[in-house]
């Protein structure tokens, strides 16, 4: 057996990431850290809630599936026929096991200091061989209904779903990750199996292991395990491509919820293909930097809003990546939603970044990058998100940060349409904004 | 890893030298007995310190300074430990080899300067920082309803016993907030420095003697402190019949909370047997409650039980449909009764022990958990890691049954709304 691992040097610390692509197409990323006791392994399919139309493996026609299938499937992958159930298996060695679904991926994971070899094998086995029956699919609906209702009561989830729904026209990124109480009752075993067989092929999946383990031992376990399993060759995955328009769908929406203080999400929809920066990773960096400098805790904007009592805490800054579009969201609590929105718009009309400020932020970005290697969960998440968003692990982050410069930065700023915004506001009953 | 404790009468320094991390973590803890009317002002104080300092007199300047120090942010928190409240400030910064010369000195200096040289004039906190911090606390108090799991738990605990510290809202109370002035806040600050028990922790690859010297040159607390009493809350009386309360809110999912008081357990029973009991009943995905209420009956997405040994308290919480209230409660009681009569297996005990062992064995993976362990030792004289592991191992099946029989439901609370689809 050829288990030669590729060593990838990481530029900000004196460490190496081990990489291998198996014959069946699965990719393996390993970053050992002997300073900790724990091992964290994640097994991810590049399939999340934002894929809802595709050609199932072995078929010729596109099918559209109900919203929430990827998440429903995540619950059902835990069903096993002969094997003992995953939670039971892992608890016997004091290991934690979990899974989560997001817009672009579904991830299964375990974390624990014991029993590494068996834990790893079992992760591959249970995810690659679930047991679905009409009965166990039916049983799950009540549980998922409660999960959806739990999120419905959270104003922040309401805003996260609302701003996506109002920003995108047809890209499925617009729908709630878990679907709706209505859509999940339309899901059945047949649909789940089609999604599973199509997207859980090893060539669409990757494994990331961080923590205290030996990469040579790990790759041997993985290869022996995968050789026992037969997979057909994966042909090109046909997933519906959406021609999403650049403009947001709805500029404004206000909803009433059981909150004491209004909250708002301000979304800026950006067509990244219209910005002449060839490296998408770098482009995302510039965009994050821009909003951090403009609206973060050290910004003049926050100081001003703070003085006027429009904001007690800085805006939360987040981004959603959807094919050619990036949705940047600014989220906050405020008693002056209308006035604050005007102030944000004003700020976006007159952007000026000075070089000294850029340099301070670059220092912070490098620092955050180094720190992330101390935490085996953080660094694992970063690797997963790199692979999902950029197709590979970015090993030269610090080099990229160091090369960020003001002239490229200005190019980015010039090519963003800052008027293309949607605002989603959650207010208590009978809310009236005071004069401020 | 090397641990050194320097005991002084006014404060203690604890250095945990280790090369496990690329960062250094520094924390200072102020501890005193909790009083309900003090929760708001204490939270306020922990916030205003982070708003500005004499040297960096606005939030913006202060945060730009942290950025210059390679993103060394100071954080603060007020947490309750049984009958006590801990106001804590911490900073986490890059090991010098990743930054520049003198960075460690500069960062430590920045940290203590922010805490001990606040933005004060004529015995009052700076008016601007005061107003801003007040806004932050007001927002926090108002936002408690955004987290219904937490909000419904506090409601249940208030109904259980509103005089006990576990029912206090950690953010504080609107009516108390109005009584705070920049003057009485500064008096409170001075009182905290004078009377609270103070502990300072450093975790990282530092020079022990130099760091102790450094800290001593920057921390000028002189008052001699008394030893603290037990942090644990004891219950004299336990309701003989359970109290059931339901309340309506504008929510989608109903929130069930059950409070159980614990009495007459020994120190080891509390620290080990009770935790094993809790792990079996509702600790994780293998627990009796998860298996029966969620997996078998599809009544909820989450259901957990949780013990707080400092409070002598256990609570169970789940999100359900309001119409399933009686059915869910019955199932929960049934699982508790089964544990009382020993209807669980040796295997269940083994699995619970494994979970505890994992938690103990991974303490050294995180600077925060290392500090928490040494701080717990400081407060309750708790066991070493080796002793902990040994005591977990020694817990028997009968010990668990015995503890199960000492746990009684005191209060059942349901916060309900208008469920959809019914």
Image (tube, coloured by chain):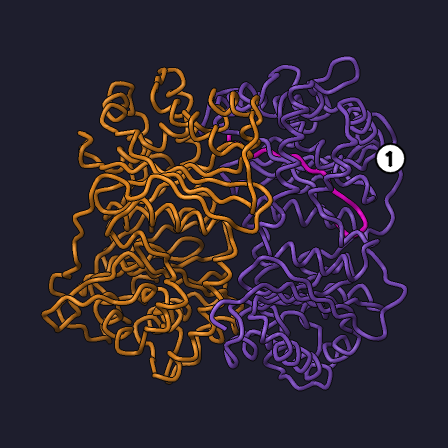
What span is in magenta? B81-95
Chain under label 1? B
Residue B26 seen in the figure:
no
Rendering coords of residue B332 (x, y %): 65, 77
Q: Is residue B89 magenta?
A: yes
Tell me the orange chain.
A
Q: Colour of chain B?
A: purple
Q: Determine the main secondary structure of the stretch shown in magenta.
A: strand
Q: Along the line of sight, which residue is nearer the eye, B213 or A60?
A: A60
Q: Say what secondary structure mark 1 lies in.
A: loop
Q: Tell whether B194 sits left or right of B43.
A: right
Q: Residue at x 41, y 71 (%)?
A: A118
Q: In which image quadrant can residue B17 be found?
A: top right
Rendering coords of residue B20 (x, y %): 52, 43
Q: Is residue A31 magenta?
A: no
Q: Along the line of sight, which residue is nearer the eye, A424 or B377?
A: A424
Q: Tell whether A436 sits left or right of A410.
A: right
């Amino acid at each position: 057996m050829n288990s030669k691992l590729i060593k990838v040097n990481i530029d900000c610390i004196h460490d190496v990431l081990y990489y291998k692509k198996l014959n069946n197409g699965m990719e393996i990323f390993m970053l050992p850290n002997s300073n900790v006791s724990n091992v964290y392994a994640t097994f991810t399919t590049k399939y999340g809630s934002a894929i809802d139309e595709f050609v199932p493996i072995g078929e010729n026609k596109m099918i559209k599936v109900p919203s929430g299938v990827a998440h429903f499937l995540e619950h059902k992958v835990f069903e096993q026929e002969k094997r003992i159930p995953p939670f039971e298996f892992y608890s016997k060695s004091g290991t934690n096991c979990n899974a989560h679904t997001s817009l672009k991926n579904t991830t299964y994971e375990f974390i624990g200091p014991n029993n590494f070899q068996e834990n790893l094998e079992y992760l591959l086995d249970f995810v690659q061989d679930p047991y679905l029956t009409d009965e166990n699919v039916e049983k799950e609906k009540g549980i998922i209904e409660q999960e959806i209702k739990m999120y419905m009561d959270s104003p922040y989830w309401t805003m996260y779903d609302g701003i996506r729904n109002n920003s995108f026209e047809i890209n499925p990124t617009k729908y709630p990750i878990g679907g709706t109480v209505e859509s999940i009752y339309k899901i059945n075993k047949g649909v789940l199996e089609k999604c599973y067989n199509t997207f859980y092929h090893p060539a669409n999946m990757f494994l990331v292991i961080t923590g205290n383990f030996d990469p040579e031992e790990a790759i041997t376990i993985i290869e022996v395990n995968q050789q026992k399993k037969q997979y057909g060759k994966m042909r090109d995955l046909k997933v519906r491509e959406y021609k999403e328009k650049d403009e947001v769908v709805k500029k404004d929406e206000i909803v009433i919820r059981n909150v004491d203080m209004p909250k708002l999400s301000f979304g800026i929809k950006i067509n990244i293909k219209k910005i002449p920066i060839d490296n998408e990773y770098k482009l995302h960096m510039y965009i994050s930097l821009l909003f951090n400098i403009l609206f973060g805790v050290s910004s003049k904007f926050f100081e001003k809003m703070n003085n006027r009592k429009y904001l007690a805490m800085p805006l939360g800054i987040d981004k959603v990546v959807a094919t050619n579009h990036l949705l940047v969201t600014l989220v906050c609590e405020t008693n002056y939603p209308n006035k604050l929105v005007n102030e944000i718009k004003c700020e976006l009309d007159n952007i000026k970044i000075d070089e000294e400020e850029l340099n301070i932020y670059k220092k912070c970005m490098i620092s955050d990058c180094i720190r992330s290697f101390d935490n085996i969960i953080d660094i694992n998440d970063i690797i997963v998100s790199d692979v999902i968003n950029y197709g590979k692990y970015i090993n030269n982050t610090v080099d990229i940060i160091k090369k960020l410069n003001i002239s490229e930065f200005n190019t980015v700023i010039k090519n963003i349409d800052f008027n293309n915004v949607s605002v989603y506001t959650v207010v208590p009953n009978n809310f009236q904004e005071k004069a401020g | 890893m090397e641990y050194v404790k320097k005991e002084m009468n006014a404060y203690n320094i604890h250095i945990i030298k280790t090369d496990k991390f690329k960062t250094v973590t520094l924390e200072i803890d102020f501890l005193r007995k909790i009083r309900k009317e003090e929760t708001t002002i204490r939270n306020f104080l922990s916030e205003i310190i982070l708003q500005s300092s004499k040297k960096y007199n606005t939030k913006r300047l202060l945060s730009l300074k942290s950025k210059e120090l390679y993103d060394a942010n100071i954080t603060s928190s007020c947490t309750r430990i049984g009958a006590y409240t801990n106001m804590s400030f911490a900073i986490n910064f890059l090991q010098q080899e990743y930054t520049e010369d003198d960075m460690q000195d500069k960062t430590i200096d920045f940290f203590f300067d922010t805490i001990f040289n606040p933005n004060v004039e004529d015995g009052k906190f700076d008016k601007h920082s005061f107003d801003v911090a007040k806004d932050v606390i007001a927002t926090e108090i108002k936002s408690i309803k955004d987290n219904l799991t937490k909000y419904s738990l506090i409601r249940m605990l208030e109904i259980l016993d509103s005089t006990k510290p576990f029912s206090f809202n950690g953010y504080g109370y609107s009516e108390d907030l109005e009584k705070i002035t920049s003057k009485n806040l500064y008096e409170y600050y001075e009182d905290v420095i004078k009377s609270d028990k103070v502990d300072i922790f450093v975790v990282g690859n530092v020079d022990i003697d130099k760091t102790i010297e450094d800290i001593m040159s920057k921390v000028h607390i002189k008052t001699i402190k008394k030893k603290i009493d037990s942090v644990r809350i004891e219950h004299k009386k336990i309701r003989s019949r359970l109290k059931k309360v339901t309340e309506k809110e504008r929510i989608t999912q109903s929130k069930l909370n059950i409070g159980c008081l614990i009495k007459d357990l020994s120190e080891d029973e509390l620290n080990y047997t009770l935790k094993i009991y809790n792990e079996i009943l509702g600790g994780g995905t293998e627990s009796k409650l998860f298996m029966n209420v969620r997996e078998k009956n599809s009544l909820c997405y989450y259901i957990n039980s949780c013990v707080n040994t400092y409070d002598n308290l256990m609570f169970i919480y789940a999100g359900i449909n309001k119409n399933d209230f009686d059915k869910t409660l019955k199932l929960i009681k049934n699982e508790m009764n089964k544990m009382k009569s020993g209807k669980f297996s040796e295997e269940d005990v083994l699995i619970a022990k494994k979970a505890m062992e994992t938690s103990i064995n991974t303490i050294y993976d995180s600077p925060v958990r290392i500090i928490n362990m040494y701080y717990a030792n400081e407060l309750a004289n708790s066991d070493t890691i080796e002793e902990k592991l040994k005591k977990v191992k020694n817990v028997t099946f009968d010990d668990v049954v015995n503890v199960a029989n000492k746990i009684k439901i005191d209060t059942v609370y349901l916060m309900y709304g208008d469920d959809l689809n019914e």
